Every structure is written in structure tokens, then in C-alpha cells.
Image (spheres, grey):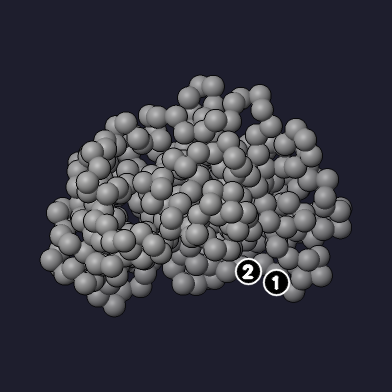
Amino acid sequence: MNKEYVLKHKEIPVVTFRINEENYDLLGINKILDAKRLPFSIENGDNLAQCAIKMNSWIKGRGLVDSRKDIKRIKKLFKAESKEELIIRSYGLNLTDHYWLHKTEEDLKWSELNFFDNKFDKLKVGENANPDIDESVGDKSPNFCVDGSIEKRWIIKENNARVLLKGSRYNRMQEPFNEVIASEILNELGIEHVAYSLKRTEDRNVPYSECECMVDRNFEYINASFVMESANYERKEPYIHYLEICRINGIRNAKERIEEMITLDFIIGNKDRHRGNFGIIRNADNLEWVKTAPLFDNGNCLFFDQDNDDIENFGVDSLGKAFGDSNRLCLNYIDFPNWYSPIAGKKIIGIVRNGLCNNERLKSERIDKVTDIVKERIAIFEKIIRKKNFR
């Protein structure tokens, strides 16, 4: 059965579209109502075909990913044929931005449904909190609109804070420890970030990380993909293009913030800084760009997915997804950072070693190898910035 839906930004209608409710495929756009509030960029606000293609991709990318290891269990648990069905059933609401959707025939209000203001999880403080989605999660939950392959779960704490729990994918369960290590490094460097803490399940002592939501009912996160697509490239390098778009929209210190991100990613070997994992914070009412988003989601680092024998083979460099280069090559973009000192570099080495030692699944040989490579990366970074300082 085909049904007409409306995408809204808070209470403001943005676009109406048709969905096949048997397989939840988007069939087409009926009308663009507010082009400037679309969650993606289109060249012409009246181009319904282009909008339909991007809208379809946006909806599918809003929910759980196929690579998530518990995706089949979740669909079975909630009797859903697809992840898209879970998105529609939860109105596409999340704790990242203020977009949502519903049938046009329904009389619904964002103020009564959004997860920033309203309850969504039956998990009580004191119960065995863990990142697994279980039967305590209702159909209307932000847990169906989170991305990434790692098991994740939003809960509400006693102080009314919205808190994200994140697990791991590999036997070493290194990602939660890495999140805390990165958070402590950023603390040492004085860089704005989302703070992560280490927790363990009560039943099996399984580690997971915990962090509070970085936005609220007034401000939302817009990822770098949207930033990059919001204006034509004109044959510019992606890095230059990103900074120019930020500047045009009033964010004057984007270069400094990106340099901080590049530095962290090189030192810890972050392999997952794709354009969904950095961006800007926007005022959700007047759409004003407020600042760059604090750094977050830093767990896929420190050789988390590589065996001991592979660590030395991969060496100091790592995959960089932000601007199409490796993390080592991205160092060419930075100037001399006045927030960095060699004293901080020495402390970072200790932070990495101590953080990895907290993981009882890691042997000392592996910890030594990882720490030695971090030490080598810091030496490379300091050599580069010394040269830049003397120019």
C-alpha cells in the first residue's frame, strides 16, 4: 500500500513523499515545502527527481546498518522485515538532529514525540545496563536510528541526561578502552570533545563506553557530508572546500578545529574519521551554524582490529577518510599548533599505555608494540611542526 509521508524539521514541514509500506521503498517526491531545511543539498529546490534519489538514500542511511552484528536479532525481536521499517515505526527520530517523518494523515507534534524531551527507554538505573537492544526498548526509540557496526543503545540517566552506550566487535574488546584513551588525550591537549567513560556489565563484566548526548532540543549536529555538498566544489581540494564553506557560514576557527582532529587521528591511528564522524553544530530554529562539533567517536584506533603480527607491518600511517588521504598525509595541512607542547606528547604516551593496560584481554607484548608506534608517531608529528614553525 502506498502512503504519503511528510518529513519535518521540528514542527516545520519540509517535503512530502510517497512510500510503499510493503517494502518501505520511497516511490517519489510530491512537493518540496521548504528547500532550505532539507537534510541534504540539491542543486534546484524544484528538482523532484534529484530530491527523491537523495531522500531515499538519506532515509536508508538514517537507521541501523547491515554490518551491525546484531541486526538480524533486532529485526526478529521487533518483528520487522527491514531496518527501514524500524525507522518508519520510530518516526525517524534520533538524538542527533531534529528531523522526523510521519504519514500526512496523522496529527502529530514534534514537541510530544522527540527524544530530547520525552521518555523512550524502559531501562532503569540500577539494572544491568549494556549496549544491546533488547525487549525493554519500545517501537518508538532512538535506538533504531543510530549508525555504525558496533552495538549501541541510548538510555536516560537519573539526571535526565541522554547517554549513549557503545560496545565492541572483536574478542579484544578494545574500542571502549580506546574511546576513553582518546578522551584523556584530548583533555590533556585542551581540545573540545565528547567525554567517554568506561563501564562494565554487571553480569559478565563486559566493557563498554558511555557518553552524553552532545546536542539538545535547540541545537543539532550536521555532518561533514552535508557541509561538503552544500556548495559546488569548483575543483577545490576537499580540505580547502570544507574550510571555505565553514567560513562562509560564520565558523571562523574551523581550520584550528580540523588541525586538532588531524593531530589526534594521526597519533592514535583513527581509521574511521569518515564525513559522518565530524561536522558542525547548528541552531535548529534559525539554521545558524554555531561552531564545529566537538570531537567524538574515536574508538576505531590503536590497531583495534589487527592481530599482533600485523601491527608492525602497518606501522605509523593509517587510513584517513575525511579528506581522501592517509592520516600521515593530512599532517601536511596543519600549521604550527600553539596548543601543543612536547610535554603533552610525553604524557600522551603514558595515557595510551595505562589505558591499554586496563584491558585484561591485552598482553604486555601487544601493549608495548602499540605504545611504541604511538611514540614514533608523536616524534614524527613534533618534527613536522618544528619545521613549520621555523619557516
Q: Nearer the viewer, residue 36 or 136?
A: 136
User: Which percent across, then down, holds residue 339?
Assistant: 50, 45
Q: CA distance from mark 2 to mark 1?
A: 7 Å
Residue at left 25%, top 42%?
Answer: 106
Q: Which residue extends farthest top?
A: 159
Dividing the picture into quadrants, the one containing residue 283 is top left
Dividing the picture into quadrants, the one containing residue 93 is top left
Residue 314 numbered mark, or none? 1
- In this rendering, position of residue 302 left or right of residue 171: left
Q: Is residue 14 above or below residue 137?
A: below
- Pointer 2 local density, CA inside 10 Å: few below 14, some 14–19, many at least 20: some
Q: Determine whether the residue tagged by mark 2 lies in a helix, strand or loop.
A: loop
* Residue located beneath label 2 in the image: 317
Dividing the picture into quadrants, the one containing residue 72 is bottom right
Q: Are marks 2 and 1 in contact (CB under 8 Å)?
A: yes
User: Which percent across, then down, holds residue 234?
Assistant: 25, 75
- In this rendering, position of residue 326 left or right of residue 118: right
Residue at left 49%, top 28%?
Answer: 161
User: Which percent across, then down, holds residue 19?
Assistant: 30, 61
Residue at left 63%, top 36%?
Answer: 197
Quarter holding the N terminus is bottom left
Q: Amino acid at mark 2?
A: Asp
Q: Amino acid at mark 1?
A: Phe
Res. 384 in view? no
